[in-house]
Image: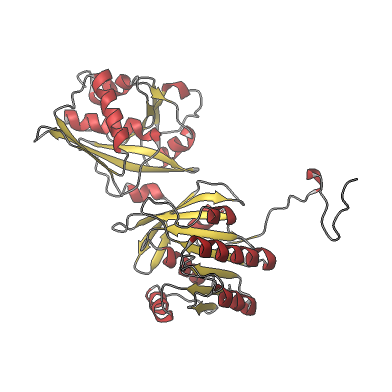
Amino acid sequence: MPAQQAEGSTKARLLDEIDAQEASRTTTGMAEFDRVLGGGIVAGSFILVGGDPGVGKSTLALQLAGRRPDLSILYCSGEESAGQIRQRATRMKLHAPRLHLFTETDITLIQQQAELLKPDLLIIDSIQTVFRPEITSMPGSVAQIRECAGLLMRLAKLTGLTTMVIGHVTKEGDLAGPRVLEHMVDVVLQFEGDKQLNYRLLRTLKNRFGRTQEVGVFEMRENGLRDVANPSELFLSGFTEGISGNAAACILEGNRAIILEVQALVTPASYGTPQRTASGYDQRRLQLLLAVLEKRLGYRFGDKDVFLNIAGGIRLQDTASDLALVSALVSSYLDRPVPEKTLLIGEVGLGAEIRQVSGLETRIREAAKSGFKIIYAPGSMSDALPSLPGTKVHFAGQLHQVNQRLFGPGG
């Protein structure tokens, strides 16, 4: 006989009987942060924000209190004193009358403070510093992180308290701690950017309440982070046309198109072995594109030093930028500039064919909005686009076709 149902347990329900009402959200006052979250913070959600030391994670968390002074926020810091946090808040000109600071790392005491204050948002900075006294291992260990994250998750789900924890990353760029931490939270955000530059990217790696791979762009200033509504304008601010080796590419970060500058420099090798240096780009992919140019188009890079730089310090991974990269390399090789107001979109295959890319219409619309007049795109996608006033789109199936149009018959 089947076992009797336990008293008080719920029974299985049909999918059609379940209410599909959208979870309520609270806007943060930071448009780019709301963007990556899917429209705002969901009540009772558990959010993990990871990033390199000094990239601005604590600034981002603290700035939430300034953007929404009406919200009660409990900020628990195990890495800075209350005086240090107050100094940063003063420098940021932060007005946060309902921000409570608690410089404690005992998770039990943090839980008691949260139950006492009943804030709208709990911030833990960082998960690697908190500990549970009953566990003998050191803070930051696998056992401590797993246990503390479990307590915070139960607190968030049982009380509806939105909880945001800050986490460190390893030298490889992965979130530090056990992988179970990423499975426990509802949202995983990666905060990244070159600390020597002013821009920051906030990337959604996981989101149970919205789309993943969304990207928010910020500019780091003395008084905190500023939302960047038009990232292309930021990354193209130093773009100089009419110089050989410069080309414009359009990448897709989530559902967002961003135009940036690709710089190449090809010079005669000074030593026996030519150098191959890439900043912001995979060096193996660079070797592949150079091999295609040698084999299919006859350019000889065997006695050339090749330097490639993605301006702005961004890490370029979208293969739709291949055509711009190749054009920049050829431009420097021939010492002929790419025509002005020209954008190049397309993945380059081993046979020098220009392959299809995702989101072509989104990329072209962003290019037209940024003032580009001529766009080169994969020939197989000519039927997928509407006409845009003032913008001419050339479709090409082979690399040599684009090469001849850009640099003439002798290119």
105 over 195 or under it: above or below: below
86 over 234 or under it: above or below: below
Front residue of this view, candidates 359 and 103: 103
Name, please, the residue furthest toward the bottom: 83
246 over 182 or under it: above or below: above
Q: In the picture, which quadrant includes the N terminus?
A: top right
Left/right of residue 407 with respect to residue 199 in the rendered view: left
The answer to whether one can see residue 160 in this image is yes
Front residue of this view, candidates 351 and 231: 351
Left/right of residue 147 with respect to residue 327 in the rendered view: right
Residue occupying the point 50% across, 46% down = 213
Left/right of residue 256 with respect to residue 185 in the rendered view: left
In the rendering, at what x and y percent does residue 274 appear?
15, 33
Front residue of this view, candidates 122 and 88: 122
The answer to whether one can see residue 339 in this image is no
Q: Which image quadrant is residue 193 in?
A: bottom left
Q: In the picture, which quadrant includes the C terminus?
A: top left
In the rendering, at what x and y percent does residue 50 appear?
45, 58
Tell me the colour scheme of the image.
secondary structure
The mark tally for this picture is 0
In the rendering, at what x and y percent does residue 54 appear?
35, 63
275 over 234 or under it: above or below: above
In the rendering, at what x and y percent does residue 365 appear?
45, 38
Name, please, the residue furthest toward the right: 1
Residue occupying the point 59% across, 78% down = 113
